[in-house]
Image: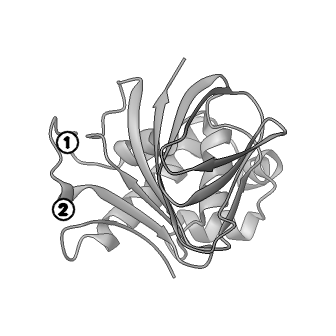
Amino acid sequence: MRSLQEQAPNSAGGIEARLAGRLAELRTERAWSLDDLAGRTGVSRSTLSRLERAEISPTAALLGKLCAAYGRTMSHLLAEVESEPPQLVRSGRQLVWRDEASGFTRRSVSPPHPGLKGEIVEGHLLPGADIPYDRPPVPGQEQHVWILEGTLELTVDGVAHELQAGDCLRFRLWGPSHFRNPGPGAVRYAVMIVLP
């Protein structure tokens, strides 16, 4: 089961509905049909339609494809569905998104704000989790991936890196990336993103 939620109780449905609405707005703002968006993302028209009606929640890979099509980072998109971006977000109120089918959890650590260029995200991958991204949401974004626990195999623009706890990889992302946890334990990491 995939879910998007604030850590506060009973908030997941509202956020998922607002996300679905925002995705529909972004497509409409560009005057794209569902077929146009399907062609840009490689995602079926029916899946996109169900997503925009909040009948399904997006996987990490699907949300990555949509963010790339709309030129937004995931945090930027999620900030757009927040009612008012705060300056301070306590740990228990940070937005958490889970894709349980793929073993991926993403926490937006930075207070969300669509106008700022930097953000911090925490990722958690279960053993065997394998998350490919076809392209960056914003080409040329700078990323710093800092491993907090475990081992992460990270491929950036075709170059593979094996990162251990304490390691930090800095790069500008222009092409595909791939996050994989080879195991045996979970991996937890922080990503610092700076938009161009």
Q: Residue at x 40, y 27 (%)?
A: 118
Q: What amino acid is at disc 2?
A: Gly
Taking the image as shown, residue 119 lies to the left or right of residue 42, namely left
In terms of sequence position, does the residue under pointer 2 or pointer 1 come before the other? 1
* Residue 127 badge: none
Considering the image in quadrants, where does the C terminus appear?
Answer: top right
Taking the image as shown, residue 188 lies to the left or right of residue 136, namely left
Taking the image as shown, residue 108 lies to the left or right of residue 186, namely left
* Residue 92 badge: 2
The image position of residue 88, as x and y in percent, is: 14, 40
Q: Nearer the viewer, residue 54 or 177?
A: 177
Q: Secondary structure at mark 1?
A: loop
Q: Residue at x 39, y 34 (%)?
A: 119
Q: What amino acid is at disc 1?
A: Glu
In this picture, is 58 found above or below 163? below
Taking the image as shown, residue 44 lies to the left or right of residue 79, namely right
* Residue 84 badge: 1
In this picture, is 173 found above or below 98? above
The image position of residue 85, as x and y in percent, is: 22, 39
Q: Residue at x 23, y 47 (%)?
A: 83
Label 1, residues with CA under 10 Å away: few <14, some 14-19, many ≥20: few
The image position of residue 135, as x and y in percent, is: 74, 40
The image position of residue 125, as x and y in percent, is: 55, 65
Callouts 2 and 1 close, C-beta under 8 Å: no
